[in-house]
Amino acid sequence: MDWENIRFFRTLVESGSVAAAARELGVERTTVTRRIQALESDTGLNLFDRRGRSLALTAVGRDFADATQPMMEAAREAERCAAGMRPGMVGRVKISAPPALAKSRLVGPLLSFGRRYPELKIQLTGEIGFASMQRGEADIAVRLTRPQKGDLAISKLGSIAFRLYAHRDYIAHTSEEDRLYIGQGDVPDAMPQQVALNRIAGGRFAFYADDVDLQLAAVLEKGGIAALPDFLAANREELVKVGSEEPLLVRDIWSVTHNSQRHQERIRRTIELFRSALT
């Protein structure tokens, strides 16, 4: 069997769609489809149930996915080991971080870092969910929640204070009993700061937004009070803190990398850069 066909198959299984697999692999969708067809021809197996434009693994396909998973993990481990054997500040570093934090605190330092080490290729992805270290989706993840499992090297980079903020005109022209809030919403996976805000607001919300930048935009439009991180709101003259000076919540910031990569110079120095930027 052609290893490349298996690699395409595994990527399709893990990403969940032909389009997502094509983006991850950097190829056209037709290339992914052609590789899957070639794998089915080589194995004589019907791996996917094709219903319209969607693909679902057949029972045989699920068994084959289980059988090929160790191969993919071994290949990724080999890639990590090979990368670790290259000395110095050379190669690619893939970083995953919350978008608002990345934009406000990491982009500038990373650009300066890249100018200092021109052979280092920096790739930054703004995302809230956990990128998979095992699947090679990121070399370093910056997260506000500490992972509880996996072969990971984890270190604390700093902390973020969240406080209640509103536009100064909103506070000046809205009585305390009429003030409304802006939040993520009463959803099962609400962020901790929004869980705290939900308790304070008592259901008196003017607007819901699932992204902290959108919440900030709503506050700037004088739409209400939101729980915002200090790094995003503290230096804006049009905003004022509401209520106590004490933070509503303080969240720790963590760096996460695979244990096999923690001693690589480019990984270690990038984490040191983050610690300096976020302290």
Image: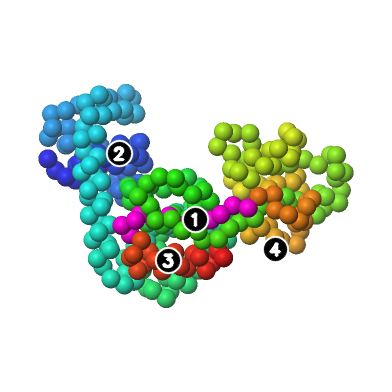
List x then y, in percent, for residue 199.
Answer: 71, 37
Q: Does 205 sit left or right of 43 as displayed?
A: right
Q: Give the residue at mark 3.
A: 270
Judge whether residue 251 is colored magenta: yes
Q: Reading the chain from its start, which is encountered first: label 1 or label 4?
A: 4
Q: Is the magenta stretch mostly helix, strand or loop?
A: strand
Q: Give the residue at mark 4.
A: 235
Whole-angstrom CA distance, mark 2 to mark 4, is: 44 Å
What type is the residue that disc 2 sits on?
A: Leu
Determine whether 155 is above or below 170 in the image: below
Whole-angstrom CA distance, mark 1 to mark 4, is: 24 Å
List x then y, in percent, for residue 47.
Answer: 22, 29
Q: Reading the chain from its start, which is encountered first: label 1 or label 2?
A: 2
Compare residues 11 and 177 and report the one nearer the observer. Answer: 177
Whole-angstrom CA distance, mark 1 to mark 3, is: 13 Å
What type is the residue that disc 3 sits on?
A: Thr
Q: In which quarter of the image is the N terminus?
A: top left
List x then y, in percent, for residue 221.
Answer: 73, 49
Q: Reading the chain from its start, which is encountered first: label 4 or label 3?
A: 4
Q: Reading the chain from its start, which is encountered first: label 1 or label 3?
A: 1
